[in-house]
Every structure is written in structure tokens, then in C-alpha cells.
Image (cartoon, grey):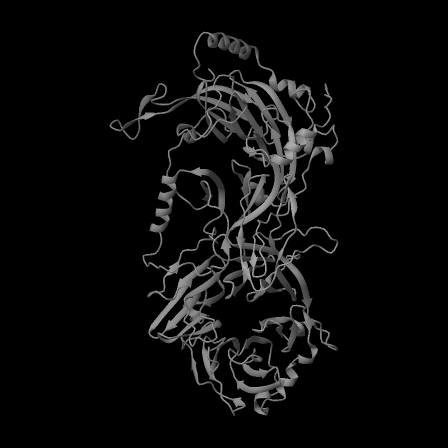
Amino acid sequence: MMKFRFRRQGTDPQREKIKQELFAFNKTVEHGFPHQPSALAFDPKLQLMAIGTKSGAIKIYGAPGVEFTGLHKDTTAVTQIHFLPGQGRLLSLLDDNTIHLWELVVGLHREVGGAKKEGGVCLKQVDNYTLPGRPGIESCSATHVTVLLLLKSCDLLCVGTEGGGVYFVELPRLELRESQTLLQDQVTQSLPDEYRCGKSLGPVESLQEHPQQPGKILIGYSRGLVVLWDLGTRHADQLFLGKQQLESLVWERSGSLFVSSHNDGGYAVWPITSGNSCTHQPASSTIPYGPFPCKAINKILWRTSQTGSPVLLYSGGMPRASYGDRHCLTIQQDKEHVTLDFTSRVIDFFTIHSMEPDREFDDPSALVVLLEEELVVIDLQTPGWPTLPTPYLAPLHSSAITCSCHISSVPPKLWERLINAGKAQRSRQHTHMSWPICGGKNLAPPPKHQELLLTGIKKSTFSTPFLTLKRRNNDKSSRNLCVSGTHHGPTLWAGTNSGSVYAYALEVPGVGSGRACERGGASESSTCVEAVLGKEIQLMHRAPVVSISVLDGRGKPLPDPYEASQDLAIAPDMTNAHSVLIASEEQLKVFSLPKVSAKTKFKLTAHEGCRVRKVALVLFHSAAQEDYSEHTLVCLTNLGDMHLFTIPALRPQVRYDCIRKEDISGIASCVFTRNGQGFYLISPSEYERFSLSAKVLTEPLCSVQLDRPLEPTATSDGTTMHPQANGTHRNQTGQAEGRTEASPCTLSSPILETPLDSPLSCADLTLDTTGEITVEDVRDFLTTVDEAENNLRNMKEEEGRSAGILIN
């Protein structure tokens, strides 16, 4: 084996500065619907909605463009979320029995891409709390949290447990107020002997504060008992001796009655009476879908309305025999009775209604339902209760996504047609109601052009014109197609899994010579496009071909045909010789055209031990110089890291860790944009958006009015806090306006992390060819005697004719 090593020159400081201005890795925003949602909350003051997931994520949404994301350190399911209204704070309960306090806080200034960025506001976990076990009780299940209630004063958190105890935690310090603790034994002492019967009351299923008398709460136990407890006097004002297993409680607005739902599919109305300390029977009890056995009513809401009877909303309660596997939610008012049958499980729901204390009625305007696979919002003010189109949280669950493609600049006319087509697909029931989750303000400027992310799914059928390539005595399937136009004519390139590349000359009707062909019978004829095989290239390492791109005379990728026809792109260099860039799973190679002779290559697998999965040619603009840009080859490997190379020289520039190497689906789904951004699936229903550009970032830029001041925060060691969410907020005492950047990955500059003799060193090389030259490398460039004679004859013929077909 012959080995040649070329000495690399020293590092160029000016080049390092340019790279800092061109490249920077940031994860910016997530698109789609949260995977496996498990909790829901709403802040009526800020008009913000929060969704928790089984993976420990918390996502806050407001008006379109207002979005924040936080992530617990442990991948544990979020079971409950509660906002501290108006404060920009929320509490989360995890499946591991821990309670966490989150705040919207201002981050410090940071440097991204060589430029100082303003600190935005992020969602940060500021404290956590675990309820201590009861002395003398070995089992921890007694203090396992089942339900949380935040009092309206926002200074006390009521914690119901599986052992039937109720604990009280001060906020925002998260300190247990032991003097207020209410154990189940204290409650049973007040019960009549015939109700007690030596049985446990069961876990605390529901806690609800009196709407008109702060400090009084309803405590509902699984066995059916409901207690109206006065926190001030530590005394039970009234006992409600329910006999059916309890699921949930809800107050009527005036506080004169409450409603309980049960596991038999029924609900009961209980009046609050003075002078009667013990109520044995409810005022009314109903099983809406009885008399046959029904599913439990998991949650019930009772909303008063000045237009008539109260609006009753509940999930479940359907007959087990015919609807045992269905996911339903019922809305009732007067004679109106609508059952919503969803395609996925109901996680939680809430209504948007009047919260002003001086108002007599709730007057609900909208119902928001969080399902396992989508968010549904229903207009309760319009007859027929139609649904509202959602401006975000688009569900992607219909079928598994198998491929995706990003369209960077959609023509305005096409965009308008797409919008109209979407409107036409909506229900016939129209609503003029605006989006009710409208908290915050989107400060992002309108986009200069519209973008589309097209996804292909597993269960889709469509018709499209196609071109079939067949080659006899070769069963290798075509992997990649590249249609390009060069100064030698339109061509089509096809790469295979066996490392073969075929170049076809296209005979297009109206451009060159086209012939008529018959299809479906003699009477039916059309003009066909002919693809004539011109050249076959066999890569000696025989690795599958990932990408093929034709470069113009300046080494830049050819523009999009549509943009070129509309003068939306710079015309390619048609005077100098073109070249073709072929990326296989193991190597990157550039061949000159039309002779198809190798110019330079980079052996990624040999140097890094990884394989190429995705390749894109991207135009990066400098964050410091408006008129400076570079075309760069971006390569994603099977290890989830990004490698950036210059073209056509293929000199390594930077490397970033982007996707976990174990995330095979994420790596396979990655798609790049032309301006240095990208998407990949982080779940079956969500795309993560990232940016490799120091200048181009798409992320939320928003403001929110809060009831408390926002103070800049730093970590305990004095370093800058890395934001966990995107967005900017405004408060009453001051303003914080600036966009939040996601935590930038450390730039893997070769001068800092790789030695000069490493193949990833970005120092200029004395030759275009990098790495080692072996006999195998030389063999790649060798041709047979017949090929050599044909090439020589072709060269002589080309000298005497104008540019035509690429290769004969």
C-alpha cells in the first residue's frame, strides 16, 4: 500500500473569524403536537395554556407565535400542572411524587456566532419539593400525591394523598405547613357510626376551593364522602355522605351547590345548607346514558349561563356495551345534547369563561379539549357548537411519516391556493370566533417569504408522472435521482445502493429532439421524454450513493429550475467546466465534467468511523458582513453529528453534535433548508427545528404582561443560565425584549479540539486531495483501454462541436 501524507499549513485566524460569523448550532423551536400529552392547565389572567407530557416536558402556548418549553431533568411523566394566575409561574406534579415550581425568568447576555445576543426570557425550574413520609408508616404510598389544589391567594398549595391525608405547602417557598395537616383519622371521627363501618375513606380524589368564601375547600374521597373544610377554624362545616365511588367535584359559581361525578356513569347535585352538618342524599342524581352499565365520568364541569340552563360538560359516562372502547365528551344545555366522539383518549379539558368576581354567570365561550393525538377547541357561543381551526399544534399522527421535503420559497399564488384549499376542507359549520388562547404578543416580523414542510406518510395514495429506469442484468435498485441542467444539456443522474452512478442525457420535447410514443392503444399518443444512458460510474468502495449534485463553473450548486426561470436566482456560470458532487455513505467525491474525472474527495468513514446519512448544499450568510456568503456542504452521519465542508474543495470546517446516535428515526427523518436550518422528528408527532447558521434563526419572539417583575438570573456558580425555552416577555415594572437563543453547542473548531494532522482540521491544505492515497484510491480513477479510447474520441469530437449532451 502506498501512503502519501501532505503537510498542512498553520491555522488562519481570519478564516476562524469568518467561520464564527457563518456557523453556529442552535435548537430553536419544536413543530407539531406534543408526544404523549399527560396534563393540561390554563391561566385565565395571562390567557396561556400549558401541556405536560409523559417524557417530562412542559410546553406553554398563547397567541400564535407565543411559545415556551421547559424540560424536567428526569424523564418522568407530568401528571398535573397548575398555573399561579398572572405571575408567570406554574407547578408541576410528576409521576415520581415530586412537585416542581417553574418561573419565566430573564436570561443573561450570551455570545452566539461571534455576536452578543440579548438575553431572552425562559421557563426555568426554580425549586422542587417531595412530601415527607408519615412517621411510623413504612409504605410511601400513604403520602403518594393524588391531587393538587392551588388556592386563589396563590400562597398555599393543598396536597391530597393516597392515604387520605391533606397537606398544605406554602408558596413560593415550597415549605410544609405542618400545623394545617389534615389526616383521615381526624375526618372519620366526625362521621356517623353507620357510615364509618370500619372502612377507609380511600384516597383523596378531588380538592376544590369555595368560589365565594376563600379558605373553605371541598375534599372528596374515593369512597364517596365529601367534606366542606374550613382552613381557618380547622373544622368540617358540612359532610356529604356519598355512597358511590367518587371521580371528580366541581363548584357552581355562586357556591350554593356543587356537583360530583362517579364511576357508575352518573353525577349528583349537592346543595350547601346552613345549620345542617350532615347531608345523606344529593338533591338530584342522574345517569345520563343509563340504565345499562356505563363507564365512569372522569371529570365534570358545571358552567352557568345567562341565556338559560347551565352548561354541563363531562368526559366518559357512555354505555360500556356499545361505547366501551370509545373516547367521548358530552355537552348538555337545555334540550341541546351533543356527544363528541374522538379518535384518541381524552387527557383533560377546560372552559374559557368569565372569571370576574362581580359577574353573576360563567357564560362559557369556548371548550378546549386535550386529546392524546390532537387539540380540539369548540365554540360554545355559536349554535351547533362548531370547532375552531387550530393555528398551531398540528397533529401529525394520521400515519407514520416516511419522508419529508422543505420548500424554501413558495410562490404567492401557490400559497394562496394552498390556504384556500385548507379552508375548503373545514367543516360546513362556520365560526367567526377568534382563537381564545391569546395570551402574550408575537413580536416576530412577518416572514419575507413563505415556507412549506411537506411530509409523506405510509398510508397515502396519489398519482404523479414518473420516469422508470431499467437496466438489464442488474438488479440493483436506484437510490437517488438528480435532474440537472448543465452547459452540456439537460441530464439525469441516478445513484444505486451498490455504489453505481448512471448519467442519462434527457431528450425533452421542445428543448431537444423528442419522439411520439403510444400508450394505452394506437389512438392515444403523447410526446415522451427519452433518457439515454451516457456514462456509468462505479465507486470502488461500492457504498450506497446518498446524494448527487451538479456544480457550475464557480463550484456553486445549480439554482432551482423554477427560480431560474423567474429570475429569482443568480444565473449559474455556464462558461467554465461544470462538476458533479457524489456523496456515498463512506466518501464525498467531486468529478469534473464532461470527462467525469475525479478532482477531490474526502473519506469520512475512514477518518471518523461514521457513515453518511443525509447531505445538503446550503448557502450560509455572514452575521457580520451583509454581502458575504458561502456555499457549504452539510453532512449528517449515522452518529447524529453534523460535518460542514467547503465546496468544491471539500475542506472540513466545523462539526456539531445534533442528534443522539441512538435516535435512528430522528437521523433518518432529518431534512435541511437552503439557508442553514433543518428539521428532524423527535417523536412521531413532533419536529425539532435547528439552525447551523449564525445569522438565520427561526424562533419565537414574544412578550407577556406579568403581575411580578422579572429579574435576570444566573446559576449558583455565577455562570450564564442556559435557557430551556424560547420567547421574550414584558412585565409591568419593566420590559425585557430580545429573542431567546437555545443553548448553543460549543463550536467544534479543529484548532481547539483536533490536532493539525487530524482529517477534520480546517487548516488550508497544500492540495485539494485530503487524507491518504492508497492503491484503492488510484483504482477508482483508472479506466479500461476501451474507455480510454472512447474518452479520447469523445474529447476530439467535442472540440469540433457546440455544447450539447453531457456524455455520449
Residue 650: x percent and y percent? 62, 26
User: How far across and how far down the image is residue 71, in percent?
Assistant: 62, 56
Position of residue 363 relative to residue 457, above or below, is below
Residue 603 is situated, as x and y percent measured from the top left of the image, at 65, 27
The quarter of the rendered structure image containing the N terminus is top right
Relative placement, left or right, of 123 versus 458 is right
| Residue lying farthest to the front in this orientation | 733
Residue drawn at (37%, 44%) of the image = 418
Q: Residue furthest left?
A: 523
The structure residue drawn at horizontal position 55% and vertical position 86%, both measured from the top left corner, is 239
- For residue 83, above or below residue 547: below
Q: Residue at x 68, y 23 (%)?
A: 765
Residue 768 appears at what percent x and percent y? 64, 21
Total number of numbered discs in the rendering: 0
In the image shown, does 194 or 489 lie closer to the viewer? Answer: 489
Compare residues 576 and 458 and report the one nearer the observer.
Answer: 576
Observer-nearest residue: 195 or 598?
598
Q: Nearer the viewer, residue 774 or 695?
A: 695
Does the rendering let one see residue 548? yes
Looking at the rendering, which quadrant does residue 512 occupy? top left
* Residue 462 in sight in this render: no
